[in-house]
Amino acid sequence: MLPGLRFLFAAIVLSMSVLVFGLGAAALLRAAHEKFVSVPLRRAPPETVFAQPNEAASPTLAILRADPPAAEPKPPDKRGFGE
């Protein structure tokens, strides 16, 4: 009967020590990481510091049309008809 009591006592002591160690480790981790947990997930957009923010010009599509100069009309002949 005595060996059974020794085993039971050792099992209880070992279980209690594991429980105390586990709770202590959990408390330590919670205290160490509490500042990270309290940070909100969504942050507000940063405020603009300047009155007019520097915005890059958006790309645009442009077409350049170069027509040849129009030919000047020739003045009509001043000679009469039939000449």
Image (tube, rainbow, N blue to C red):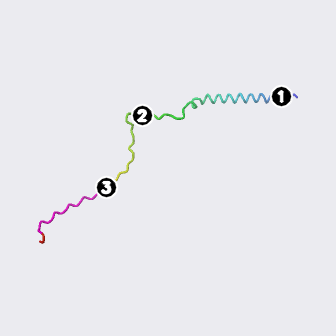
**Which amino acid does the dot numbered 1 rest on?**
Arg
Secondary structure found at label 3: loop
Q: Nearer the viewer, residue 18 or 40?
A: 40
Q: CA distance from mark 3 to mark 1?
A: 101 Å
Label 2 belongs to which residue? 48
| Front position among marks 3 and 1 | 3
Residue 6 image label: 1
Q: Is residue 51 left or right of residue 18?
A: left
**Which amino acid does the dot numbered 3 rest on?**
Arg
Q: Residue furthest front?
A: 81
| Front position among marks 2 and 1 | 2
Q: Earlier in the sequence, mark 2 or mark 1?
A: 1
Q: CA distance from mark 3 to mark 2?
A: 41 Å
Q: CA distance from mark 2 to mark 1?
A: 72 Å
Highlighted magenta segment, given as a residue range = 65-80
Image point (24%, 59%), residue name: 70
Q: Residue furthest bottom?
A: 82
Q: Earlier in the sequence, mark 3 or mark 2?
A: 2
Quadrant of the snapshot with the N terminus? top right
**Which amino acid does the dot numbered 2 rest on?**
Thr
Image point (38%, 44%), residue name: 57
Residue 65 image label: 3
Name the spot of residue 18 as percent of width and height, x first: 73, 30
User: In terms of image quadrants, where is residue 6?
Assistant: top right
Q: Residue furthest right?
A: 1
Q: Is residue 35 left or right of residue 11?
A: left
Label 1 Cα neighbours within 10 Å, binned few <14 / some 14-19 / many ≥20 = few
Residue 29 image label: none
Q: Name the magenta segment's main secondary structure.
A: loop
Q: Nearer the viewer, residue 74 or 82?
A: 82
Image point (12%, 65%), residue name: 78
